[in-house]
Amino acid sequence: MSGTQTASQRLKEIYDKRKAEDAEIDRLKKEAEAEDLETVKALIKLHGFTQTKLRGVFKSKATKSSGTRRSTAKKKTS
């Protein structure tokens, strides 16, 4: 066989290479996340942050009700 590859062979080679790179990216993301989490834990311990102090840092989505709520209290009659 000559030194040139067919398009199908080259395509397979590129797909295999990309699959290996994607796996490496996923592995590195997990490692970086674990390292960052350890950094955050160390900073929390160093500065003595509490949940109350950190509450404003994290945004939480408020759940919206499906409609307006009406009071079930009895009306006063005069």
Image (tube, helix red, strand yellow):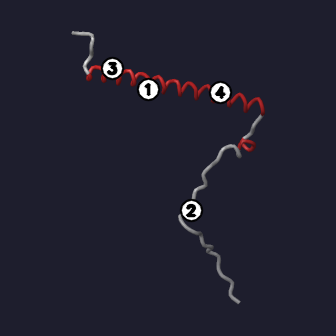
Q: Residue at x 69, y 43 (%)?
A: 57
* Mark 1 residue type: Asp
The label shown at residue 65 is: 2
Along the viewing direction, whichever of 9 and 67 lies nearer the viewer: 9
Q: Secondary structure at mark 3?
A: helix
User: x and y percent of residue 67 in the render?
Assistant: 55, 67
The label shown at residue 51 is: none
Name the quadrant containing residue 73. Answer: bottom right
Q: Residue at x 44, y 23 (%)?
A: 21
Mark toward the start of the polypeptide (3 vs 4): 3
Q: Which residue is label 1 attached to?
A: 22
What is the residue that sits farthest to the bottom in this orientation?
Answer: 78
Q: Which residue is label 3 attached to?
A: 13
Q: Is residue 66 above or below residue 43?
A: below
* Mark 2 residue type: Ser
Q: Is residue 57 above or below residue 28?
A: below
Name the quadrant containing residue 5. Answer: top left
Q: Which residue is label 4 attached to?
A: 38
